Amino acid sequence: TPIAAWATATPLFSTSTSGAGRADEFEHLPPEQLIHAFYYLWYGTPEVDGAYTHWNHEVLPHWNEETRKRFLHGVRFEPPGEIHAPFFPSRGPYSSSSPALLRSHMAELRDQAGVGVVALSWWGPLWRKGSSDTQGVQTDAVLPMALDAAAAEGVKVVFHLEPYPGRSADSVKEDLLDLLSRFGSHPALLRAKGDRPVFYVYDSYHIPPREWARLLLP
């Protein structure tokens, strides 16, 4: 399957395998599929996952040294009463590994926010060393459930490629081939013009443009 639309910030201005940024890659899509929401799969609870994950994220230090001195950092939030989130979920802390929860979220995004596409956070396949977020959470195992939940609720999916140690254009190519071998025919997968899948890339600037060009150009 050829790599298609490539986005680092917004899905409407992408780089295709031709190397050109083209908004018309998406002109065939219905309006709701132009509204994308980033959906993180890193949440866990003791009941489902054996422990809280990401709800108990540590407080990170501010990047400015003077500001950092003024605020507490390096301690963890203590769920369920104190969580790492600006808003408290109406259900309370939940697990991203709950199929029922995933379906409910997809339906709410569709009906209450008009979202037609979710960008699923992914740090790489399980076999890749370092394929987790800074808190040690891996999201690969949740992907099948998330795609099935999205398909059941009529929501499309794109993948949000998160950074990991040693990421390069070559390793990203391996990642894309891995994703497409498993989910390339899934009905939830959004495709741009030419039947090409869509990806977001977090922190893409850490890889030189010439390396991206080597991956993306024919």
Image (tube, grey):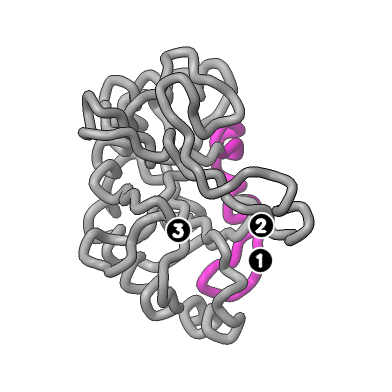
The quadrant holding residue 129 is: bottom left
Residue 127 percent location from the top left of the image: 21, 65
Regarding mark 1 in the picture, which secondary structure is present there?
loop
Q: Is residue 197 left or right of residue 131?
A: right
Whether 101 is drawn above or below 132: the answer is above
Q: Are marks 2 and 1 in contact (CB under 8 Å)?
A: yes
Q: Which numbered disc flags the more N-terminal residue, 1 or 3?
A: 1
Judge by depth and name the residue closer to the eye, 14 or 105: 105
Question: What residue is shown at x 52% (from left), y 84% (from top)?
Answer: 211
Say what amino acid the circle numbered 1 marks: Gly
Whether 188 is drawn above or below 172: the answer is above
Judge by depth and name the residue closer to the eye, 133 or 150: 133
The quadrant holding residue 206 is: bottom right
Q: Nearer the viewer, mark 1 or mark 3?
A: 3
Task: Inspect this view and state whether residue 23 appears.
Answer: no
Q: CA distance from mark 2 to mark 1?
A: 6 Å
Q: Is residue 129 left or right of residue 196?
A: left
Regarding mark 3 in the picture, which secondary structure is present there?
strand
Q: Nearer the viewer, mark 2 or mark 3?
A: 3
What span is colored magenta in the figure?
12-36
Question: What residue is shown at x 38% (from left), y 19% (from top)?
Answer: 104
Task: Inspect this view and state whether residue 78 appears.
Answer: yes
Label 1: which residue?
21
The disc placed on residue 13 is: 2
Say what amino acid the circle numbered 2 marks: Phe
Judge by depth and name the residue closer to the eye, 174 or 60: 60
